[in-house]
Image (tube, rainbow, N blue to C red):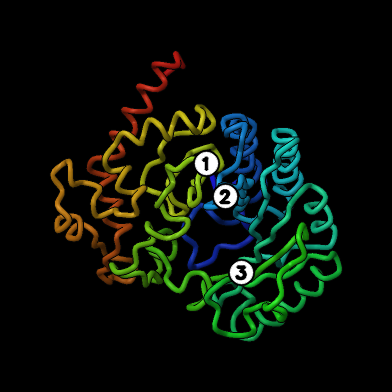
Amino acid sequence: MQSIYWVLTWACHRRCVHCYDDRFRPYVRSALTDVVAEGQRAYEAILANLPDDLGWTDAEGTRQPTTLILAGGELLIDGVREELFYPVLDAIARRWPDNPPRISIQTTGDVLTPDHLDAILARGVCAIAIASIDDYHVGMKGERKFRFMQEIRTLMASRGVQETSIGGAKDARLKSPDASSRPEKGAPTFLFFGAQPDLWIGELWPRGRAWANGLSNADYSVNFCARWSGAKNFLKLGQAGSEIALEPDGAIYPCCLKTKAPLGSLAEERLEDILQSVATLPAIQALNAGDPEGMGLTSGWSREEFRQKAVATDGKGRQVANVCLGCDRYFDEHLSAELRDLRAVRRSRAALPA
């Protein structure tokens, strides 16, 4: 894969109103132990079921390392950092000692300390995304986010971590002060992003608390499926453009927003086996093409019917149309059951207990 987006835990120190999944929230005492244990139980099997040659080939035919994007929740909070995050980083180093993946992490940044930064750099993290630069994260509204960005820049400079800019930002304050230069080869990097209109997600998706709070503004013209981190090309194992998403228990999805049901579980099966199996389904082929409207063409759903079903009422009582909603309905009515049946066939062939 070109990249794998792996949510290690649902534990977070925030409960942001725009979050795409309500499971991201604070957990305390035994609840924190339990939610972290979900990731602890699965990560060794997940790593074992990823390809031994974890890489992809670019347009020039050059082999490139897969980017493992590790995220939460928040990976640096107490109860997660030492118990799950650092052990996963150490396990990745053991799994691919000779040809390691490129490790990128996402963090809100407000819990990042010099000691944390030293620890993750020593464990092979080479890219850090500060993912809270928007007005939805408490403490970041208005000008405060720009003061916070300067604090992060000072910390990163002290460790030689060089800033890169994410594409599309119009406000100069959201870009690297030295945006015209390229980071030194091999140097660790960081960038800022968030739910700004011109920074990463101008649209908020019909998912989680964003949907429940009536914040989603991605209409039917916004086809996330055809974007990077959408489902397009996810089946192209080892090729450019391929990405999958993982949940803490190993559940695998074709996009980072996640479909209504997983394709399978990397805690149980090899990635190659799951992708080869689900690729036989026409609806999955449509997602791989970035064409969710085409999911049901072989099972009686016309494109017009898909559009009619791609409408739902959000938490503010607004009727919203979006292709993700149509995908959800198709999963509800057809695809979830088909994926369960395929999984049962694979388990039977592997003589796994039911």
Which residue carries the number 1 mark? 238
Helix, strand or loop status at disc 3: loop
Residue 112 placement: quadrant = bottom right
User: As shown in the figure, which amino acid type bears the numbered disc 1?
Assistant: Gly
Q: Earlier in the sequence, mark 1 or mark 2?
A: 2
Question: Disc 1 and disc 3: Cα gap in Å?
Answer: 31 Å
* Tag 1–tag 2 contact (CB < 8 Å): no
Q: CA distance from mark 2 to mark 3?
A: 16 Å
Q: CA distance from mark 1 to mark 2?
A: 28 Å
Image coordinates of residue 10 in percent, x first then y, are: 57, 50
Give, as a three-letter code, the residue at label 3.
Answer: Ser
Label placed on residue 80:
none
Q: Residue 4, position in %: x, y? A: 55, 47
Q: Secondary structure at mark 1?
A: loop
Q: Is residue 253 left or right of residue 278?
A: right
Identify the mark nearer the N-term, 2 or 3.
2
Residue at image coords 85%, 58%: 115
Q: Position of residue 207 (x, y in %)?
A: 40, 59
Q: Are marks 2 and 3 in contact (CB under 8 Å)?
A: no
Residue 132's tag is: 3
Residue, disc 2: 10
Q: Nearer the viewer, mark 1 or mark 2?
A: 1
